[in-house]
Image (cartoon, rainbow, N blue to C red):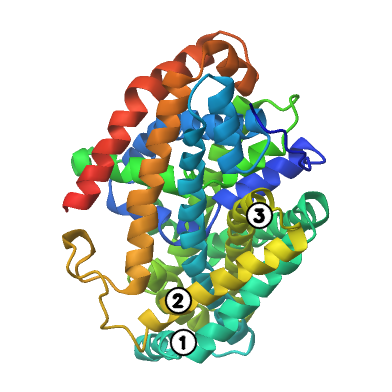
Amino acid sequence: MTIEKQTEQWSSTASFLLAAVGFSVGLGNIWRFPYVMGENGGSAFLIIYLICAFLIALPLLVSELAIGRQGRGSPVLSMRNVAIQSGASSRWGNVGGIAVICVFVIMTYYTVIAGWTFDYFFLSVTGSFENMSAHQSDEMFKDLTGNPWRLLFWHSIVNIIVYLVLRRGVQAGIEKAVYFLMPALFICLIIMVIYAITTGDIIKTSHFMLTPDFSKVTIKTILIAVGQAFFSIGIGMASLITFGSYLNKKVSIPMSGATIIIADTGVALLAGLAIFPLVFAFGLEPSSGPGLIFQTLPIAFGQMTGGQIFGPIFFFLLIAAAMTSCIGGIESVIAWIDEHKGINRKKGSLIIIFWAWLVGFLSILSFNEWSDFYPLNFIPAFAGKTIFDCFDFLAANILLLIGATLTSFMIGWLVPKHIQLDAIGGKEGYFYFFWRIVIRFIIPPLLLLILVFGLAV
């Protein structure tokens, strides 16, 4: 017998889309996607990425939202209810549990990284980047990551803000937060793009990001594109199932899914146009990852005209991207504890935030005091990885892929057609035919291949 769980609902489709896009758009969109695109064939990679996003990510995104809306509960309860409705074992709810664990692990260290954006925002406001050299920028970043108490302070600030939002619920908390943060993100992003184009080197940027070079396209490129599409959108992290549980039946899940993917990709492309003209104009290295944001760009902001103004704008953009992802990620864990333990939202939010804060301290120490500590060195796949690296690898390369594979198998093979159609909210047609083929025959073996490949290399 399925369990009915009364949940809040989004006040409008726009509120849902802002929250879902906010969760999907994170720091990885801004510091990783443009660089990966430039290093893997420019627009050739973009074409492959879009194919992967709509061929693989969209069916999974639709599946997670549909399971949430059909199951009307946390990821665990939603998976359980849909399985029971389909005549399958209620133990399929454990797949939702994998997703909840995955997103909790991610949030314990993501809130640490989000704290960096706050620190650099205040550094930019106080003029700390002025006339900065490469050596000074490197030392500034080392001073931050090497100071556990400074990291803990910002990590705590991030968790406090997330708690204050989530304790208020869906409409009074999440919606009000995204109605402020998402417009702020887009406004800051547009301002930065205009500034970068008018003051930076747009020609080199266009060549780096958009010139198609199919000679760089290999099987590895395709796997990178799949991984980027999969992880950037936030599939397999429980939050989209939770967001789906707050949806009413009038909302088109396929259209919403396509909108989320287009917005997520659009932000990543705009981020590239905001960053790389400045990087190339000053002859800096377009390095991948955090180094680009926290070591390379401060040099540019410190040397360019208007850097004192546009540096804070850029880092506030990062704050908005980080906070919307934190809010969306932790919400799914709070929804689970509310159901599983019967704890009200205010108390449940405090418990989850406290544990995320506490476990996050382990990641903080792995950047300094425990930087030479490799806890799982005896396992080949985890060899040479710090606590932070182990958390990241466990969540992104194992739990997320296992959960998504099992989710696609369940909804593709165990859920009857009439329940699939009711959950998605559509009729038999081209999209449903496409979705059913991909979710059954393409996604499970592909994700298993990526899982094995990730563990082997």
Residue 423 lies left or right of residue 200; in this view the side is right
The x and y percentages for residue 337 are: 64, 54
Mark nearest the camera among 2 and 3 is 3
For image coordinates 51% across by 91% down, the residue present is 149
Looking at the rendered image, the disc whose residue lies closer to the viewer, 3 or 1, is 3
- Locate residue 436 relative to residue 337 in the image: left or right: left
Looking at the rendered structure, the kind of residue marked 1 is Leu
Q: What residue sits right under mark 1 in the picture? A: 144
Quadrant containing the N terminus is top right
Q: Which residue is labeled 2 in the image? A: 294
Asked whether disc 2 touches disc 1, contact meaning CB atoms under 8 Å apart, the reply is yes
Could you say whether the residue bearing mark 3 is in a helix, strand or loop? helix
- Mark before the other along the chain sequence, 2 or 1: 1
Residue 258 visible in the current orientation: no
Extreme residue toward the front, this view? 1
Residue 171 horizontal/vertical position (percent): 81, 50
**Residue visible at 50% across and 19% down in the picture:** 415
Q: CA distance from mark 3 to mark 1?
A: 38 Å
